[in-house]
Amino acid sequence: MAAPTPVENISYPSPKVQLPEANYCVALMQCLNDFRKHNVLCEVTIVVNGKPFYAHRNVLAAASPYFRAMFSNHFREQTDAKPVILENITAEVMEELLNFIYTGTIKITPFNVKDLVSASNYLLMTSLKDACVSFMKSMLNPSNCLGIESAADQFDCETLRETANNYIYNNFFTVSQTDEFKMLSAERLEEFLVSDDTKVEREEHIFEALITWVKHDEKNRSPLFSRLAKHIRFPQMSPYYLADFVETEEIVLGTPECTALLLEAKNYHMLPDRRHLIKGSRTKPRKSMGVMKVIFAAGGIQGATVMKNTFCFVPKTNRWYPLAPMNVARCRHGLALSGDMVYAVGGQSREGAAQSSLSTVERYDPRTNTWNTVASMNIRRSLLNVAVLDGRLYAVGGCDENNFRLNSVESYNPVTDNWQYVAPMSTCRSSPCVMATGRALYVVGGVNYVGMSLNSGECFDPMTNTWVSINPMQQKRASACGAVCNGKIFVIGGWDGANHLNSGEMYEPDIDQWSSIAKASTARWDAAIAVESDKIYVVGGCDRNSLCTLETECYDPDKKKWCKVAPLPVATHGIKCSTIQVPNKLIPGI
């Protein structure tokens, strides 16, 4: 029988006892807090407003980097025998701070939170500061958000400042009715008036907020009104509100600078087709108005099929989004904005089929994302282009159903829903570029009656109903695309009779002169063009190999540079574009 193993050689598992460490620590700190209150084993005396507080050096150093630095070896000799005197903290707050340091609990209220965040910032007590910041975020409301934002700036609370700032912008009209708002500095108020992010349902609310602020201290603030009023977007107000409230407001009547601002607003409402000529931020809706400017593209040819599809390009997201299709499939048509509506005019319903040329016209309403039929032209036209001048839509040239090139021009009045002929051009033109700027209509390039590409141009004066020739372009261009940017005419691409072009030209009407611009990366014809934010977008078309493309390029006239942006969803030519304003709700994710 084997000898038994000695007990001392047997391995037993070590017993483990789990102590309630959390309760132990709590009890320990409560004991130390009692020591503090009764000055037991305390090595430090803190004096606040003449009142002494006793504490333990190690506890203070563990809780606060401020005290840790103070009690380090470098400063120790200076503090060993002397009381620590703290300023900018009240005795009541000091007692709350010490209680928090020893117990980890504190009562934060709307009445002490600013004092506590100030003290915690001073003593570098991050956890307490974070608790105060969270409390102030939770108590944000219109009547205190400006004060909380100011406190956040004062005590370097970046996340609180950002939260309060966003709250103010998102609730501006309600905030503008509070007492805190009336105490804003002119500089801070100006930031709200300027910003696109100030959220209001109507621009009228911005005006009312400014009037409220000025009238709170009219004697001292009235001289500031002209400076601040220039940031009010009067063109975005209802014309009835302008007449009934703005023009009758005494502060406005007493400010000569407001005359030009109101005239700008009136012109915006009375001359909708000239809105693009009014530069500056006042004609741009704030983001909260729920609208944005986009490049609107309609129709065209995909493969061998003429399409009804419409899309819009949002420069901010660099993406294309679908919109409601037209009622009639059309390509090589005219497309132009008049007022808030886009008109699709004529074109072909089957590619290359002159017999499918259309006289029909439909109008897109971006507010409802719908198309409606309006009066048809007097004759069928495809390969035409259109432009708006003085509120009228001009359909110029093109080909009829017998494939005869036209020199006739029709004018449409949106008010009467009626087309009528005006004086014909001197030359028959299909696929011309048609632009309006100043008080004149310009037609350049295209194909003449014998099928030759043209570089000639003509200018129409609606007051005299006459055409005059302008200087020819540097190159012949048919099926090019043309647009107006900052009063200058840009014509890009096209076909010169032998080659497809990536070159472009700029025409200055004041001096009747053409000059070359930077070449695009892609030669294209039968493309679309539109202007947004002083940049020119060229969309789709066919390349130098006559292959349909989906590429979109953007030209910056100031920088004289091209860049590529998001391509069309599908390669398309014979497409047309315009710049319009659409509701945000039509754009997913905006």
Image: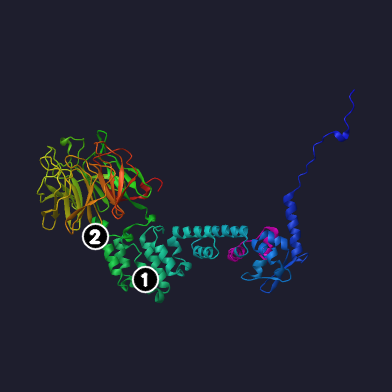
Three-letter residue code for mark 1:
Phe
Q: Nearer the viewer, residue 245 or 435?
A: 435
Residue 559 in the image: above or below residue 400: below
Predominant secondary structure in magenta? helix
Q: Which residue lies under the disc numbered 1?
A: 225
Q: Position of residue 128 (x, y in %)?
A: 62, 59
Q: Position of residue 392 (x, y in %)?
A: 19, 53
Three-letter residue code for mark 2:
Met
Residue at the spot 34% in from the left edge and 72% down from the top edge: 251
Badge 1: few (under 14), some or many (20 or more) residues near its Cα, within 10 Å? many
Q: Which residues are magenta?
A: 95-120
Is residue 117 one of those drawn in magenta?
yes
Badge 2: few (under 14), some or many (20 or more) residues near its Cα, within 10 Å? some
Q: Position of residue 353 (x, y in %)?
A: 17, 35
Q: Which residue lies under the disc numbered 2?
A: 270
Could you say whether the residue bearing mark 1 is in a helix, strand or loop? helix
- Residue 216 lies in quadrant: bottom left
Q: Nearer the viewer, residue 544 or 178?
A: 544
The answer, for residue 237, to whether it is visible in the render is: no
Nearest-to-viewer mark from 1 and 2: 1
